[in-house]
Image: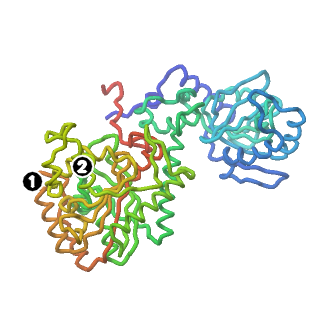
Amino acid sequence: MSVPEFNEIVESNDQTEARRYHLESLRELVGNVYPNKFDRGVIQDGITIISNQKATITNVVEFARPIKDKHISDLPEGEKPLDEQRDAANAELNGYHVRIAGRLAVPPRVMGKAAFVHLSDGVSRLQIYARKEDFTVLKNTGDSRLSTLDSWTAFGLFDHGDFIGVEGFLFVTKTGELSVHVETIRFLAKAMFPMPDKMHGIADPELQRRFRYADLIASSLQVEHDGLTTREVFERRAKLISGMRRFLDDAGYNEVETPMLTPKATGAAAKPFATHHNALDIPLYARVAPELYLKRLTVGGFEKVYELNRNFRNEGLSMKHNPEFTMLEFYCAYMDVNGMMDFSEAMIKESVQKATGGSLQVKYGENEIDFSKFERISMMDAVEKYALEGRNPHGNEGASSSSEKDQNDTLPTGRVSALFEEYVESKLIQPTFIIDYPKSISPLSKASPENPNIAERFELFINGMECANGFSELNDPQEQYERFVDQMKEREGGDEEAMVMDEDYIRALSYGMPPAAGIGIGIDRLVMLLTNRHSIRDVILFPHMRPERREDEK
């Protein structure tokens, strides 16, 4: 396979050629055009108020805006502040010397011997004002400055999207905009590609996912947004995860790490990715679930454990499925399925509030999801309510099927599951725990003491999506062995997703595991719901995509 040339990756056209010329011209003026660092900060009377990494544009704006608003606020659109208001604001703002860095959010706007441009840190923008006679460009090689003329020439070589660092003092313009009066500029990095359209960003979903870095840039520079920006989606994702971690940590759970490569593909009914370990000369599988390892830890004495990490399933792609996805799994000794539902409901509520900034209601498509209340209904009752009512024996809308309704308690397991998937799931819009699953499709869960054919298992459905799966854990090693044997028979019959026998797990259970409950929560699907995104790939930063093909490969 041939290695593409740099000019094939950064394709040559009028815009990229202009940027290459600007880069080489800047290199002649300032030396190193990709310096190693830039020190940021806010200083007053020689004392640092905000230091280096905390002095983002967002933080500087949040620091300076109250000072400005004390003197100038609530201006009608298009109206300028009074001179005395502006003078009072600048008398205070001019005392703060700032060093900030960011991306040029717009092309520089030159007005005679001065220029205005906005810098962005990906969240906020701050205008800078560069007047020809007032600023110099610092060289990045050595410790010197360019002349006024060469500084103005260098400024003219800056492109939309470049990174620069500036130093100067805060002030308010005649239009009332908070700005930095620039005294020095340091060039930090060149954008070789032109920036996306500020009005529309990147509209093609495939390009958004394939070039997530460009999508993040585009959404940060876009003037108007319909809903959350790309960055806000992933910030909300991070807040959800940190909220869950905090809730579990506060409840006494220990976060652990279990193998990502396993000798057996166990823990869930799924088709695995397979690889080979050369040194050990054994097959290994990208884990489909950490469940059996976490329960081994419960055997070993960890009463409360959790893991938040990736699972891998070598299956199809859909709006709800990605072969690599994030799962939170946790287990608690001496708890049953009902306690686990109570605990996970409380955790989800609190984490949703933290992620959304306090709300338990979120808009998802045409629906409003209310996380303040969770319903609980048995699978059979749900089938009777949504699938059997109003259906004829052929499955069409119309008269109900009395033969099915009258004998719903004895419907074959496969029939119940099929009816549930076809007719019920899509109708479960509000958070709903479906309980009392057939034991035969729940190989790792305990049977109900009241009904040996029913498993103490639940699944959480929201807007028709399964978001969590939990149960009272089976801790009888003999029964678990028999369940594995049944699964092996299913596999021999052609079911590639049926579980395999895990002898070591049976051995672990034979040391004794206390009563326990566990749950797996699909993080990606929860994030979809909290961000109004309808494809799982829109809440994964770098989803798997088919490789791009170069022109010479087509």
The residue depicted at 47 percent of the width and 26 percent of the height is 11
Mark 2, residue position: 420
515 or 425: nearer the eye?
425
Judge depth for marks 1 and 2 and give the one in front. 2
Query: Compared to 98, does 551 lie above or below?
Result: above
Q: State the colouring used for the structure image.
A: rainbow
Query: Compared to 221, does 264 lie above or below?
Result: below
Query: In terms of sequence position, does the residue under pointer 1 or pointer 2 come before the other?
Result: 2
Q: Amino acid at mark 1?
A: Gly
Left or right: where does residue 96 sit relative to residue 295?
A: right
Which structural element holds mark 1? loop
Q: Amino acid at mark 2?
A: Phe
Mark 1, residue position: 493
Q: x, y percentage for residue 107?
A: 65, 27
Q: x, y percentage for residue 311?
A: 33, 54
The residue depicted at 36 percent of the width and 52 percent of the height is 467
The residue depicted at 34 percent of the width and 44 percent of the height is 320
Q: Quadrant of the N terminus?
A: top left
346 or 217: nearer the eye?
346
Is residue 281 in view? no
Q: Residue furthest right?
A: 84
